[in-house]
Amino acid sequence: MNPGDIGWWGVALAVAGGAIRISTPYLFVSLAETLTEKSGRVNLGLEGTLLMGAMSGYGVSFLSGSPWLGVLAAALAGAAFGLLHAVVCNLPRVNDVAVGIGLFIFGTGLAFFLGKPFVEPRADRLPVWPLGGWSDVAAIRAALDVSPLFFAGIAVAFAMRWALANTRWGLIVRAVGDNAEAARTAGYPVNLTRTLATAAGGLFAGIAGAFLSLSYPGTWAEGLSSGQGLMAVTLVIFARWHPLNCFWVSLLFGGASALGPALQAVGVSSYYYLIGAAPYALTLALLIASSSRRHRLVGAPGELSINR
Amino acid sequence: MRERAEAAAITAGALLAALALFALFLLANGRDPLAVYAVLWLGGFGTPFSLQATLTQAAPLMLTALCTAIPARAGLLVIGGEGALVAGGVFAVLAGLGTAGLATAGLPASVGTVATCAAGAAGGAAWIAMAGALKHLRGVNETISTLLLNYIAIAVLNHLVSGPMRDPAVSLKATSWAIPQATMVGTIPGIGVHWGFAFGVIACLLAFALLRFTVFGFSVDVLGGNARAAQLVGLPIGRLTLIACALGGGGAGLAGAAEIIAVHGAASSSLAVGFGYGGILVAFLSRQNPLAIIFFAILVGGISASGGLMQRRFDLPDAATQVLQGMIFLCVLASNAFYGRIRLFQPRAVAE
């Protein structure tokens, strides 16, 4: 057998490589949503934030020649969008879920409006770490070209897990998210905490966008995002509001997204779209199995409008 | 009366604020806002041709807005209009193909048209009723489940039109077999807009009457106002939830059927172009009132329809209309903070 022709192993490799590559934006948006929801609000507008991040990242990388400066710009644009969500939600009688849908429409429109000049030019992309250099098999080398942002995402997951559990800030965020009235009585500023948590979440969602435009797929065009931002809410439910679980869930969603194309490459294409939708069906099944009329989902912050 | 005047004044204020924000945005991009607004008017409402395009856009928006508005009256936040529209479109095509043999059986083609619309509405109704059932039986959050159902519906659509239902003769884009030409409907005489617009207006009027004048409408409003109170007075919460979801989904499903019988003639990914999400915007602008939906669907449809002309005249990207719609959405949501704050609209204290 010719060493380059690895048949079905190629499918497994492509899925593993795809899981690593495609999971990075999932990881960042799910961490973003976890932090926001831990403070007691839902941000359904991360899709718009993600596209703003993708556009600003690509634009700044093109104009400055530095993709890392692009990531910084994406993070700032994302934080600004998070702040916008928080400021509108701080007003009385405003529904956070509806504001999210508004930001989804606004952010998508603004990204394509401001990003029009960047559709043609080629911006510098982020480097990858070739961790597969030890192998002779091209498919393994391709699968192990890993973006530094993947590792950054893992680091953020660990840091968020640690900070939520062990720091004063983490305690305040959780207290505000579980019972705003009690937190207010104890003297913690509810709206300020939520504002900061949502802005920080927006920052991570912006980085997720920069990954899309500057690493993989690595371009700026309409249809760049396949709804990763909109899916953040369901990823977080799957991860039970736990930052480390976000990592595993992101790998699962990334791998599932890669399975369809990998099977197509070996000639199996009849269930391409259904395989792509499998994670959504799985999430729905999980929700049905774990929901109850009597109590909230395990691990859900008490103030969350979406779980009452 | 006072409450309605308050809602109208605050919504009008929010719209003006959004127009002012968008004017600043245009200035920052070096365009003359007044000139752009003149073209927006021209491209959306100013000529018979642009008005036709606007009403064509408004037709599915009215129906998908009902998908959010009717369940909202029962206290649910459903965002599944996109999925219900797609489900309705797929069911409509199946019914259209299934009744293709009517002509040979000697039945009029209009039977096929009616069957197609009914199947579309039923498909959409079943799709959102699933979310209602999950909410009632298992406590599954309807916002999340309808979001997931959107993705599942679009995946099933793509699967069907690229495999089992694909018409191999159409090579440009994966498309299903076309329904018979006789099943398709033309335009409403006199205004040149397809019949989906009439469906939308009639559906909104019916929904308004149902919510305003019937026991069902009153019960749904009680449920939406206070679920615990509804339970205490013995309202059938499960049934009300299910019916509200099915009616809303039926609206969006009918939108899918109308897109099939009046525009596309076959199912393809062109069904999922965002009318479901636009419908959510229209529903919130209308404060979930079906009568107001007719007006705001035409307004939002007009903004969308003017995109082409704005692009040609000012070299503004197509997305400009979406930026404006997003600003309107955010301003209207933020305007909720003003209810009960304007003295003019508050009940006067009785003098001693």
Image (cartoon, coloured by chain):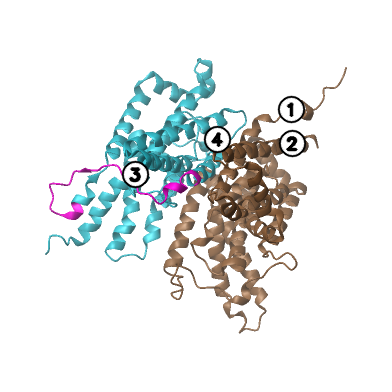
Q: Nearer the viewer, mark 3 or mark 4?
A: 3
Q: Are marks 2 and 1 in contact (CB under 8 Å)?
A: yes
Question: Do the residues marked 3 and 1 share a common chain?
Answer: no
Mark 3 to mark 4 CA distance (whole Å): 30 Å
Quarter of the figure with the N terminus of chain A: bottom left
Ranked by sequence position, the earlier of labels 3 and 4 is 4
What hue does chain B carry in this figure?
Answer: brown
Callout 4, which amino acid?
A: Asp
Residue A137 falls within the magenta-colored stretch:
yes
Q: Which residue is mark 4?
A: A96
Question: Do the residues marked 3 and 4 share a common chain?
Answer: yes
Chain identifier of the residue bearing label 4 in the image: A
Chain identifier of the residue bearing label 3 in the image: A
Residue B63: % across, % down: 64, 55
Ranked by sequence position, the earlier of labels 2 and 1 is 2
At a point 68% along the width and 64% down the height, the residue shown is: B193
Callout 2, which amino acid?
A: Ala
Boundaries of the magenta span? A113-140
Q: Residues within 10 Å of mark 1 (few under 14, many from 20)?
A: few
Q: Are marks 2 and 3 in contact (CB under 8 Å)?
A: no
Q: Which residue is mark 1?
A: B342
